[in-house]
Amino acid sequence: MITYGSDVVIARPPSDVWPYLIEREKQAQWSDVPMQPLTEGPTQPGSRMRLSFGEGPLRASLTLEMTAVDPPERLAFTTVSRGGIHWEGEYRLAPVDDRTSRLSQRGTLRFSGLWRLAEPIVGDEIRRGEIAELEKLKAILEGAAEK
């Protein structure tokens, strides 16, 4: 099993950060994982999306379902597709003060079948990628604050 977690402090209030977690168009600006909506309407518990990641023989396509959408504090998801990877994760957003937020992410991935062979390689890449995504989101939001 792979576990990951990271935090970033963003010089923007939670009300400015939350849309980048919940709105698909804004989420696509900072996430490197392409996501295709499978359900219509706003993101809510039960909303599903297909995501793809990896390259060559280590390419995966998973269906995620939102398990919690608690604005502007928490977004959680789990995989509902069977494909060798079970992923559970969440984002938590909390005010530090009136103008600053702390965004945390935590998750676990469990591999089965042939994917278990790739777990040691994929684990480090996922951890680095998750941290890089939060740093990219921070840069986008703080850059927007300067304009």
Image: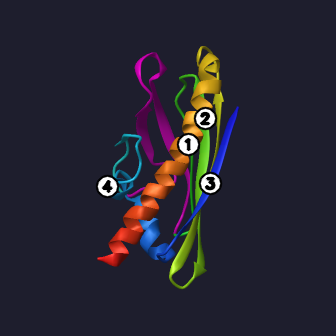
Image quadrant where residue 104 sits:
bottom right
- Closer to the camera: disc 1 or disc 4? 1
What is the three-letter code of the residue carrying label 4?
Glu
**Quadrant holding the N terminus:** top right
- Closer to the camera: disc 1 or disc 3? 1
What is the three-letter code of the residue carrying label 2?
Asp
Q: Earlier in the sequence, mark 2 or mark 3?
A: 3
Image quadrant where residue 36 sits:
top left
**Spot occupied by residue 89 in the image (x, y as percentages of width and height):** 60, 47
- Closer to the camera: disc 4 or disc 3? 3
- Spatial CA distance of label 2 from label 3 is 13 Å
Helix, strand or loop under label 2: helix
Q: Would you name the residue on which mark 1 appears?
A: 128
Name the residue nearer the viewer: 24 or 11: 11
Name the residue nearer the viewer: 68 or 8: 8
Residue 44 in sight in this render: no
- Closer to the camera: disc 4 or disc 2? 2
- Spatial CA distance of label 1 from label 4 is 23 Å
Q: Would you name the residue on which mark 4 appears?
A: 25
- Spatial CA distance of label 4 from label 2 is 27 Å
Q: Would you name the residue on which mark 2 appears?
A: 124
**Spot occupied by residue 48 in the image (x, y as percentages of width and height):** 44, 43
What is the three-letter code of the residue carrying label 3?
Ser
